[in-house]
Amino acid sequence: MTIALDPSDTTPAPSSSPEEGFWVPEAAPEETGASDAAAHEEAGEPDAAAHEETGGPEDGEPAAGAPEDVEEVAVDPADHDPVVVRDAEDFGVYARTGGWTFALKVARSVRPGGQPAEGTAARKVSARAFAALAGCSPERVMRYYKAWDMAADDGLVPQFEVLEPGADIELPDADVWLSYYASRSSASSVRGQAISAAAEAEGIRPTKALEVAENPTALRAAILADPGTAEAARGALLDRMKEDPALQTELARAIARTDDLKKAVASEAKVADRIGYVRQIVENGQIRTPAGQTVDAPAEVRAEAERHLSLIDELDDSEEAGEWAGEAYESVKGLVAKAVEEDPALRVQERRTRFYSSLQKATKVFEELTLDEVMEEEIYEEDMLQRLEALQEAIGSCITALRRAAPTTS
């Protein structure tokens, strides 16, 4: 569509221009709207553009609480106050074109510093002068300028050089605007670019993610107050920890320093170990006996493990798996013990393995006794000698038993 602009847009300004030799446009009603919007943004208040970026009702959809079906009525502008008619027309223009409406004003009137004032550009002003007239910051003006520049590179709008002050052109749709406009200065930083890229990968507007990143206190409040937000934050932290060792260490340290969290982690670790015990029987077809042997799982044990594991895997994320894991572990463990006892060869090997394990532990403990200290310092107690003598007697009995059990050689 073509935008009708007030003739004052093309009227030369008096010589009291902020920059000598540059033409400065007067503030037409549309310019006043842009100035108001800019002032709101600089004050931290939402304006029309900010509302569009942060997610208002889509074009053609009724706002919350508004009737869904509104009958179209033929209206004659001559029957209404001209000021109201102008506001309605401006609203319609913005509803269809969004930020392109203001970007055009910048594109046809601004000549950034350093560019020669030749030909058409001689009538244009600097971004600083335009911002002063609009009552906003030069940075805001340049964000509109850069958005137009990127769109021009894509062939969506004309280049600045062919636009004269007051020129009208057909503008792109409003929903395309957010693809080019970065409403926050942080979007141009390395951090902002990373946030924007992540937002696009998630299928959301970068401006929404940048707004959250610039206000951590608001994010904290949302997490504390809303379980859904807390769940989203938890998932995001877990995903980030996979590639952020420093965050892993920081969270582990925080958990270790909090007693309730330590208990919760220990409990969940126990549940995970039990589920892992059952799962490895199903996936590997092997069992680990109480003495630590790894052998092929009997069919009965494997079938029972599969039954319990299917029940656990069907649980919703909101359901606690602790009770199910405990039941599965005890049931499968009992079948494993039964299978060991019913297999003579496996039973003998199990007891041999258990005996060796106990012997190795006892040997290690005895080897760690520092006998030199007994001679150097007065640490002797009568009870120590009695315990060692009892141990010596037990070892002698064990040796005798093993010799009796040793096979005779002919």
Image (cartoon, rainbow, N blue to C red):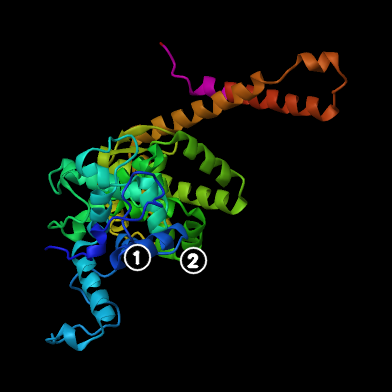
Report which residue position mark 1 lands on. Answer: 32
Which sits in the foreground, 312 or 51? 51
Horizontal and vertical percent position of residue 144: 30, 50
In this orientation, does residue 268 appear?
Answer: yes
Which sits in the foreground, 52 or 257? 52
Using the image, tell me which numbered label, if any, was put on residue 225: 2
Q: Is residue 379 above or below residue 147?
A: above
Q: Quadrant of residue 98?
A: bottom left
Crowd around label 2: few <14 · some 14–19 · many ≥20 (10 Å): few
Helix, strand or loop status at disc 1:
helix
Question: Which quadrant of the figure contains the N terminus?
Answer: bottom left
Using the image, tell me which numbered label, if any, was put on residue 272: none
Q: Residue at x 23, y 57 (%)?
A: 10
Q: Main secondary structure of the magenta part?
A: helix
Which sits in the foreground, 304 or 117? 117
Horizontal side of 51 relative to 367 (left or right) equals: left
Q: Residue at x 44, y 19 (%)?
A: 407
In this orientation, does residue 302 appear?
Answer: no
Magenta residues?
A: 400-409
Crowd around label 1: few <14 · some 14–19 · many ≥20 (10 Å): some
Q: Amino acid at mark 2?
A: Ala
Horizontal and vertical percent position of residue 29: 30, 68
Helix, strand or loop status at disc 2:
helix
Q: Measure the C-alpha gap from mark 2 to mark 1.
A: 40 Å
Nearer the camera: disc 2 or disc 1: 1
Look at the image and say whether residue 406 sits in the magenta stretch.
Answer: yes
Q: Residue at x 79, y 24 (%)?
A: 385
Question: Which quadrant of the figure contains the C terminus?
Answer: top left
Which sits in the foreground, 45 or 82? 82
Q: Amino acid at mark 1?
A: Thr
Q: Is residue 249 above or below residue 90?
A: above
Horizontal and vertical percent position of residue 358: 54, 29
